[in-house]
Amino acid sequence: MVSQSRRWNPQLARLRAMTERLGPIGTITTDFFRAPHFGGFREQMAQPLLIDMAIHAFDAVRFLLDCEPVSVYCQSYNPEWSWYAGHANATAVFEMESGTRYVYNGSWCSAGAETSWNGRWRVSGQNGTALWNGDDDPTLHTATESTIPDTSHYSGIGGALDVFLRALRTGQRPSGEVHENVMSLAMVEAAVQSARTGRPARIDAVLTRAHADAIRAEGRADVGHVLQNWPSVRDALATPPEP
């Protein structure tokens, strides 16, 4: 299990419940603007925002829509005042399997009026809109607004650990199980590839290349045999072995 701790944010769970009330979703956007002075390795990375931070939002949109990404076009850059060596700013547009477009727009060198660490979200659907500022409860804006019940009994890293222990004790597969988490990593890798090449990147192409790299690098024959017999990466991730 991977601790994608924001999956256990009760406010994000409520936003997911609101998203389900909106009918077909056209666009989801996340604005993330902060100006942290970390020092150390982050300020030396080539893609600090995309690699070290954006995965939280990428994983959250998969959680909200319960569907997977298809492709991404991303541009990254570094403003002249940035204290990062690499690209501290990025804008990425993902196409999801549902047809929804997800737009992530972020900066790690944007001082003043900073957003939440969770970002600022807008979910736009056929029946209305849901908004979340990342810190307070989300709000639903439709012609027939209704009360959204609490849908999560867990919160933060503590909640993730509770679910992890329950999985160990019961064998029940948890949210964030390692096979399921791979697609969030693939979104990051595809965004970085697109930013580097200046062209859209397809998620399946990223998975295929990673699969081939894994087979070449694998030192155990039995594991290599399993990898070589995957029908496809998506199929293997969708049907992980039973615990």
Image (tube, grey):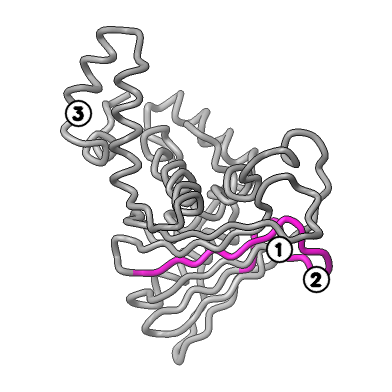
Which residue is tagged 1? 33
Dominant SS of magenta comes to loop
Q: Report the span colored magenta.
A: 100-120
Q: Count neighbours of disc 1 (C-alpha within 10 A) and say few if under 14, some if 14 to 19, many if 20 or more.
A: many
Which element is circle 3 on? loop
Which quadrant, please, contains the C terminus? top left
Cβ–Cβ below 8 Å for labels 2 and 1? yes
| Residue drawn at the location 39% of the way across and 85% of the way down | 127
Q: Count neighbours of disc 3 (C-alpha within 10 A) and say few if under 14, some if 14 to 19, many if 20 or more.
A: few
Which element is circle 2 on? loop
* Label 3 – label 2 distance at C-alpha: 48 Å
Residue 216 in picture, x, y percent from top left: 32, 18
Q: Earlier in the sequence, mark 3 or mark 2?
A: 2
Q: Earlier in the sequence, mark 1 or mark 3?
A: 1
Residue 117 within the magenta-colored segment of the rendering: yes
Which residue is tagged 2? 113
Which residue is tagged 3? 230
Which element is circle 1 on? strand
